[in-house]
Image (tube, rainbow, N blue to C red):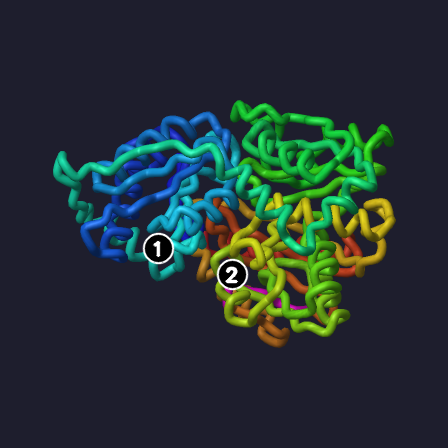
Amino acid sequence: MALIKSISGIRGTIGGRTGEGLTPLDVVKFSAAFGQWLRTRQPGDGPHTVVIGRDGRLSGGMVSQLVSATLQGLGLNVIDLGLSTTPTVEMAVPGEKAAGGIILTASHNPIQWNALKLLNEKGEFISAADGAEVLALAESEAFEFADVRKLGSYRTDATWLQKHIDAILALPLVDREAVAARKFRIVVDAVNSTGGLAVPMLLEALGVETIQKLHCEPTGNFAHNPEPLPENLRDIIKEMERGAFDLGVVVDPDVDRLALICEDGSPFGEEYTLVAVADYVLKNKPGNTVSNLSSTVALRDVTQKHGGTHYASAVGEVNVVEMMNEVGAVIGGEGNGGIIYPDLHSGRDALVGIALFLTHLAKSGKSASVLRRTYPSYYISKNKIELTPEIDVDAVLERIKSKYARNPINTIDGVKIEFDKEWVHLRKSNTEPIIRIYSESDTLATADHLAGKIIADIKEVISAKM
């Protein structure tokens, strides 16, 4: 069992003992804390509204009922989008002039996990400081529930997914005619979650000629590990290798991460989803870009090519968005396939990423594999070390920092060490009990070797402390 309280929300495994997993009592406690925080943040008689939505995982219905009833008990009105996507809920919050929102999804985590992702009135993830206030309220259980005559209302709204798609098609840089003219044949893998509803709807609206659905029934029985990494995508890669399709589109359970498979079955590269979309956007709207410290430097190269400046933020969508707002970035995101296009909204959105990428691909006249070869080639090795409770992660990272003190080091989020043209980034995950180790070089072998060296250093430090 696990329960993780972080900048990424309240995330845990379903079941177990209270406080050790995301049990019904924990769901109620944290929902009440968020509702109480919203009422404090926007005082007055109200009533205030909260938008909720969920991905397709098995526990979603149960968690949704608990959240809705708790918010109503606080006197808050609930608009339930039902099976939806993270970016759709993010758009619906300001669209409904709501006080905030809750997305019920554990994103890329396996089937036994779920989470409460908390949004402010702008439809953006709440800040670390705001999150700390919510957690303090949960700890103190300082909730004040409403009188029976002032209970909140509840209604469902199934229209927001279409509104989301309509807003994407209305963007000046999305060219439906160009996409339709290419008569694309596309395979979609939605890991049996809500992307199975949203992505085909979008592709049909864009005029895609052929849509082959793979794992698109939103049953919550994930057909494979839901993180959209190449090793988890054997089914769609095999389908693409047959040569009958132009592109494979893969999304995670809540549709905020996008991975692409080329016409020959080769992965376009999660890191390069953002690079390609940024290249297209910057050609038409020059400006700055932002990605996190664990993302490829290829985005920096593309940004500089178009005369802009690239900035690196701490890992986490809220950190990327904050920096994008500070520097006026026209495009940004994370190297896990998370695209943030502020002309639509300030959140990772696989749907707008698909529309912009298909427009770029259509106008280029190239195949996906040829388009990929037009970008600088860097390779990222992504690794992790499982943590046990007795490991002092901060002390481990401090020892590694000391060992490489002669190298350029960035400590705004964990420890990032630069080695000439290579880098390695070590940080404690916000969503899992692990240390993530990302390294990048101009060859995968070199990136793997660098990661292996750092992993050996970490294990040596841990062993010395045991």
The numbered mark, 1 or 2, whose residue comes first in the sequence reads: 1
Q: Mark 1 points at which residue?
A: 131
Magenta-tinted stretch: 412-418
Residue 141 has which mark?
none
Task: Please state which of the two labelled residues, at mark 1 or mark 2, is closer to the viewer.
Answer: 2
41 or 266: nearer the viewer: 41
Looking at the image, residue 100 sits to the left or right of residue 43; the answer is right
Residue 61 shows in this picture: yes
Residue at x 42% of width, y 55% of height: 122
Looking at the image, residue 120 sits to the left or right of residue 88; the answer is left
Q: Where is residue 54 in the image (x, y as percent from the top left)?
A: 45, 35
Quadrant of the rendered structure where residue 404 is? bottom right
Residue at x 27% of width, y 35% of height: 153
Q: Position of residue 190 (x, y in %)?
A: 62, 32
Q: Name the residue under label 2.
A: 321
Q: What element carries label 1?
A: helix
- Is 465 covered by the magenta stretch? no
Looking at the image, residue 136 sits to the left or right of residue 459; the answer is left
Residue at x 68% of width, y 34% of height: 204
Classed neighbour count for the residue bearing mark 2: other residues with Cα under 10 Å, few (<14), some (14–19), many (≥20): many
Q: Where is residue 80 in the image (x, y as percent from the top left)?
A: 39, 35
Q: Quadrant of the N terminus?
A: top left
Q: Position of residue 24 (x, y in %)?
A: 30, 31
Q: Are marks 1 and 2 in contact (CB under 8 Å)?
A: no
